[in-house]
Image: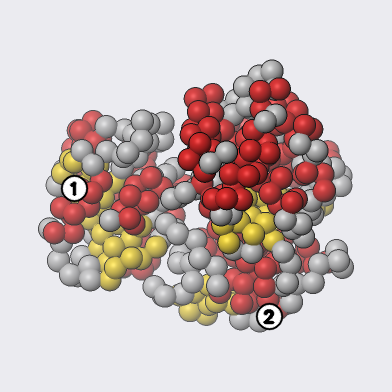
Amino acid sequence: MSFLNSFKFINSLSKFGIKPGLERIKQLLEFIGNPQKKLKFIHIAGTNGKGSISSMISQVLIESGYKTGLFTSPHLYKINERFQINGECIDNEELSKTMCDVKKFVNFIEDKVTEFEFLTAIGFEYFFQKKCDVVVLEAGLGGFYDSTNVIDFSEVAVISSISYDHTEILGNSLVQIASEKAGIIKNNSDVVVYEQEKSVYEVIKKKCFETGSKIWNVNFSEIDIKKIDLESSTFVVPNHPEITIKLLGIHQIKNACTAIKALEVLKAKKVWNVTDSSLCSGLKNVKWPFRFEIINTNPFIILDGAHNLQGIEILVDNLKFYFLEKKISFVVGVLRDKSYSLMFKLLASIAKCFYVVNLNNHRSLDANFLSLHLKKYNLPIFSFNNAFNGFKACVNNSKTEDIICCTGSLYLAKIIKIL
């Protein structure tokens, strides 16, 4: 199967949407020999931060000498990004071959396999064929019914920050969402938990009790921040030397501490060798695009893929911290299934103006509709049919001392980065 035909086949599966449940993925994996049963995993679920934490853990394990697979979603530019070994994306030839190996069994599944299930199976098969020592496995939008949860056990399970997102699938309350995310916890496992709201933490704690699992809490009060600026952050946590990360924002320090705790738990098993040297170098070398990413300084242009309420809260806090209450010119686009009213109420509190754009996605909230919604804030609003025109207009109307932030969706950040 050519790469083009492989890509067309994947796109054909997208029409089956999201169908929670593990029976389809179990059947598909059975046909290809259950490669997931021959691999070791660090499994990560949550609402925000799980991509950054996955990347951090993966990079440290790479620098510790382990052949490390990384499975993430969504991809930003090309689907190859979802399957990485030691920081290298799968190439087109290898991807086409693995797709072909898996595709021949898809029609044997009575219920139609979804796109994410197919990609998950490809990931397991690829990492097995390449003999990875460990796979850092990021769950999709869920947990218990997420197709990554077909694995039998994880070396460490990590629960990142949990908040409201995909409520139409995961539930309308934090307790419901937390219950779904905590579904990745297996019997007698080790579970690292980012600091959560009390109701969320109680759900995770109860799941750990029911499964006989040990819970490891990340304590943010132990963080001693030494330096934080627009280039990097340096901090100290107990039992480790000074650590520097280049991912910006206080929240990334918290994500790093969550990754550190997971690696400490892994090391305590006595079969994984993670040194302070590999920890420090790994965390310093992590790159994860569109997370408060500065792409220009005159004027400042920031790309941030925040697309839910908690993500926007974090973004606003970071903008206030780094730019000392300066008003921001926002280029914004959002999907219509997001809590856009609450998101933009927060952005309006620090906004100078809004450049509202349509996204190249069938789920995009119409720019004209959003512009009308934003009129109540009595700020200058400019509406554009596409992101290119909106972004260029914002830049052209800005002075060198201005701050431009492009946010609301990873789709928008991706478009702007290409320009």
Distance CA(mark 1)–CA(mark 2): 46 Å
Q: Is residue 106 left or right of residue 316?
A: right
**In this view, 170 is above or below 204:** above
- Amino acid type shown at disc 2: Ser
Which residue is disc 1 drawn over?
A: 389
Q: Is residue 301 visible?
A: yes
Q: Please identify the residue farthest to the top as the structure is shown.
A: 110
Q: 73 and 275: which one is in front?
A: 73
- Amino acid type shown at disc 1: Asn
**In this view, 269 is above or below 13:** below
Task: Return the x and y of residue 146 as percentages of the image width and height.
Answer: 65, 35
Q: 63 and 105: which one is in front?
A: 105
- Quarter of the image with the N terminus is top right
Residue at disc 1, secondary structure:
helix
Task: Return the x and y of residue 209 as percentages of the image width and height.
Answer: 82, 42
Residue at 71 percent across and 22 percent down: it is 108
* Mark 2 burial class by Cα count in 10 Å: few <14, some 14-19, many 20+: few
Q: Is residue 258 left or right of residue 407?
A: right
Q: Quadrant of residue 185?
A: top right
Which residue is disc 2 drawn over?
A: 277
Q: Is residue 39 left or right of residue 401?
A: right
Task: Return the x and y of residue 289 as percentages of the image width and height.
Answer: 45, 59
Residue at 67 percent across and 57 percent down: it is 69
Q: Disc 1, disc 2: CB below 8 Å? A: no
* Mark 1 burial class by Cα count in 10 Å: few <14, some 14-19, many 20+: few
